[in-house]
């Protein structure tokens, strides 16, 4: 073979060799899809590094911490206001209209007759409580008259709901009920269910007035 013919052939072989080398080096390589090498864990072990990372994440989110704190305060304030609306902080008949007081006197009398023995001691106890919460002479007279001629409980429950007196009526039912008698406790629970009182309102009234 002449030198002129060998030169192109040797150049072709050299080019083919370079092409094969590049193919071998990059065959199957996909840098965009490959996972980068994991950094070496900090001194002290992987567990320490994880703890540090969690602390760093917490420290890097002051706005989130502030938002959560303010949200919790706003929600707590709303719940307290809602609680005050649902449940009277104090049972004061002097704050109510005369028609509301009359309904509550009749309801309390019927509750006493249904939830206790309604003996003289029970009557005196409820009457004494009514005086403590502001029942004047006229209101006490209405209570006594209702004991002698009680109205149907269903009618009184409807009147209580119509006048938005549910927490007051439940408090009266709790006071009129004999907590030592299972029937008395069940009657108070029945009134709470009939008046559709929320659980937190029931617990609040129970803490204040259940004896």
Image (cartoon, helix red, strand yellow):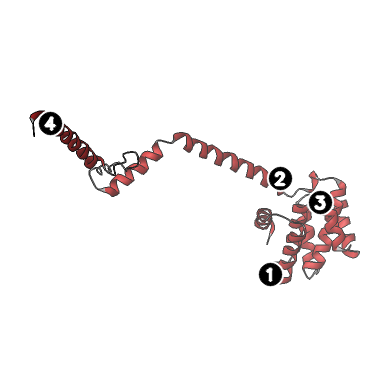
Residue 5: assigned label: 4
Q: Nearer the viewer, mark 4 or mark 1?
A: 4
Look at the image and tell me whether residue 181 can be seen.
no
Distance in Å between CA atoms under marks 1 and 3: 26 Å
Coordinates of residue 113 in the picture (x, y in percent): 82, 67
The residue tagged 1 is 180
**Location of the N terminus (image quadrant):** top left
In the rendered structure, the answer to whether residue 42 lies left or right of residue 171 reads left
The residue tagged 2 is 85
Coordinates of residue 77 in the picture (x, y in percent): 61, 41
Residue 69: assigned label: none
N-terminal-most mark, 2 or 4: 4
Say which of 136 and 152 sits in front: 152
User: Alpha-carbon neighbours of circle 3 within 10 Å: few (<14), some, or many (≥20)?
Assistant: many
User: Alpha-carbon neighbours of circle 2 within 10 Å: few (<14), some, or many (≥20)?
Assistant: few
Distance in Å between CA atoms under marks 3 and 2: 22 Å
Distance in Å between CA atoms under marks 1 and 2: 30 Å
Distance in Å between CA atoms under marks 3 and 4: 128 Å
Coordinates of residue 52 in the picture (x, y in percent): 32, 42
The residue tagged 3 is 135
Looking at the image, which residue is at 55% across and 42% down? 72
């Amino acid at each position: 073979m002449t030198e002129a013919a060998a030169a192109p052939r040797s150049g072709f072989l050299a080019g083919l060799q370079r092409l094969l080398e590049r193919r071998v080096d990059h065959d199957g390589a996909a840098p965009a899809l490959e996972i980068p090498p994991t950094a070496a864990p900090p001194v002290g072990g992987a567990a320490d590094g994880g703890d540090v990372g969690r602390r760093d994440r917490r420290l890097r989110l002051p706005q989130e911490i502030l938002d959560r704190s303010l949200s919790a305060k706003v929600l707590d304030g709303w719940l307290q206001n809602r609680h005050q609306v649902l449940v009277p902080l104090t049972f004061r008949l002097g704050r109510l209209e005369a028609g509301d007081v009359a309904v509550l006197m009749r309801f309390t009398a019927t509750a006493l007759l249904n939830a206790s023995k309604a003996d003289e001691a029970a009557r005196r106890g409820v009457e004494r409580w009514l005086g403590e919460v502001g029942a004047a002479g006229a209101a006490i007279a209405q209570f006594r008259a209702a004991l002698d001629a009680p109205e149907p409980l269903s009618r009184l429950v409807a009147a209580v709901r119509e006048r938005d007196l549910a927490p007051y009526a439940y408090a009266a039912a709790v006071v009129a009920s004999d907590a030592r008698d299972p029937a008395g406790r069940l009657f108070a629970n029945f009134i709470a269910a009939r008046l559709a009182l929320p659980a937190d309102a029931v617990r609040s009234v129970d803490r204040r007035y259940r004896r």
